[in-house]
Image (spheres, coloured by chain):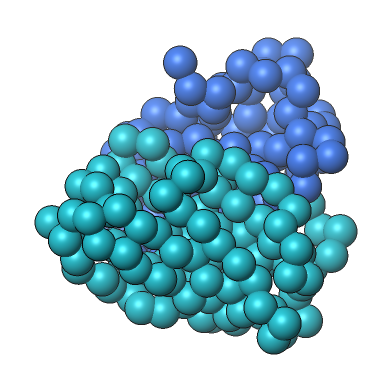
Chain colours: A blue, B cyan
């Protein structure tokens, strides 16, 4: 079993829908939680960053971390075709710096 | 554009061969990270260099090695290549002390035939 699990999708939604992307993890020592977006044939780019538990909002994106359940989520409001990409969750331990552990990614398709 | 430059973008080679992938980090970033992305293993951390020194090692095979030069560019050397080494190899850089915020290049796609 992988340390970080993510449904690979693809997840297909109509434009304007609210999208929920999730990851579960097994190691309770993870403290830093990130969401990266990866367009086809491109490198991942950081979308959201959260330290420990709680919520964080940035425009149409909201990241939630529930450490008690070892579960993190990314919500996308008013989804746009330009949001079509693979979304990767990533995690890190204290003192592990940027040795990130990634989920396998969820492919999202937003249809006009 | 992340500011991280990787070359070559594509590389096709045969089993048993050796290749070198090159990365230039963002201006001012001292840390360089190498990650491997494959269909079965996903994106995995290989190795980190900081200002020329190896800082951390992940799931990097003994056949693979890396270095960071005084001008801060880095090279990842892959030798005795096997079919299973076919993957996307990403380089990333970060600002000092910034955990979680990696700037990735566009990757080098390696195909081993």
Give the quarter of the image for residue A68: top right
On the question of residue B4 being in view, the answer is: no
Percent position (x, y) of residue B109?
31, 64
Q: Is residue B5 left or right of residue B41?
A: right
How many numbered dots are placed on residues in this image? 0
Q: Nearer the viewer, residue B86 or A28?
A: B86
Q: Is residue B102 left or right of residue A29?
A: left
Q: Where is the C terminus of chain A found, in terms of image quarters?
A: bottom left
Give the quarter of the image for residue A65: top right
Residue B42 vs A98, above or below: the answer is: above
Residue at 32% x, 64% y: name it. B18
Give the quarter of the image for residue A46: bottom right
Residue at 16% x, 61% y: name it. B14
Residue A101 vs A29, above or below: the answer is: below
On the question of residue B97 being in view, the answer is: yes
Q: Is residue A51 left or right of residue A17?
A: right
Q: Nearer the viewer, residue B79 or B91?
A: B79
Q: Nearer the viewer, residue A97 or B56?
A: B56
Residue at 58% x, 73% y: name it. B74
Percent position (x, y) of residue A109?
32, 50
Residue A27 vs B21, above or below: the answer is: above
Q: Is residue B71 left or right of residue A77?
A: right
Percent position (x, y) of residue B77?
44, 64
Residue at 74% x, 70% y: name it. B52
Q: Where is the N terminus of chain A found, in terms of image quarters?
A: top left
Percent position (x, y) of residue A21?
50, 35
Q: Nearer the viewer, residue B77 or B85?
A: B77
Residue B111 vs A91, above or below: the answer is: below
């Amino acid at each position: 079993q992988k340390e970080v699990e993510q449904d690979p999708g693809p997840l297909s939604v109509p434009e304007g829908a609210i999208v929920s992307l999730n990851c579960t993890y097994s190691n309770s020592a993870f403290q830093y939680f990130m969401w990266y977006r990866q367009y086809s044939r491109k490198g991942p780019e950081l979308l959201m960053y959260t330290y420990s538990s709680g919520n964080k909002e940035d425009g149409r994106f909201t990241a939630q971390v529930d450490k008690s359940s070892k579960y993190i989520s990314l919500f996308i409001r008013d989804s746009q075709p330009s949001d079509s990409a693979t979304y990767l969750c990533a995690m890190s331990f204290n003192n592990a710096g940027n040795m990130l552990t990634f989920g396998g990614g969820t492919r999202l398709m937003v249809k006009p | 554009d992340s500011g991280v430059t990787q070359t070559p973008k594509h590389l096709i080679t045969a089993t048993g061969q050796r290749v070198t992938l090159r990365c230039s980090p963002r201006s001012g970033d001292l840390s360089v990270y190498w990650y491997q992305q494959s269909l079965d293993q996903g994106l995995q951390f290989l190795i980190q260099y900081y200002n020329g020194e190896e800082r951390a090692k992940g799931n990097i095979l003994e056949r693979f090695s890396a270095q960071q030069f005084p001008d801060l560019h880095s090279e990842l050397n892959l030798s005795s290549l096997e079919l299973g080494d076919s993957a996307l190899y990403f380089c990333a850089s970060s600002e000092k002390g910034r955990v979680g915020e990696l700037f990735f290049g566009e990757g080098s796609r390696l195909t081993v035939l």
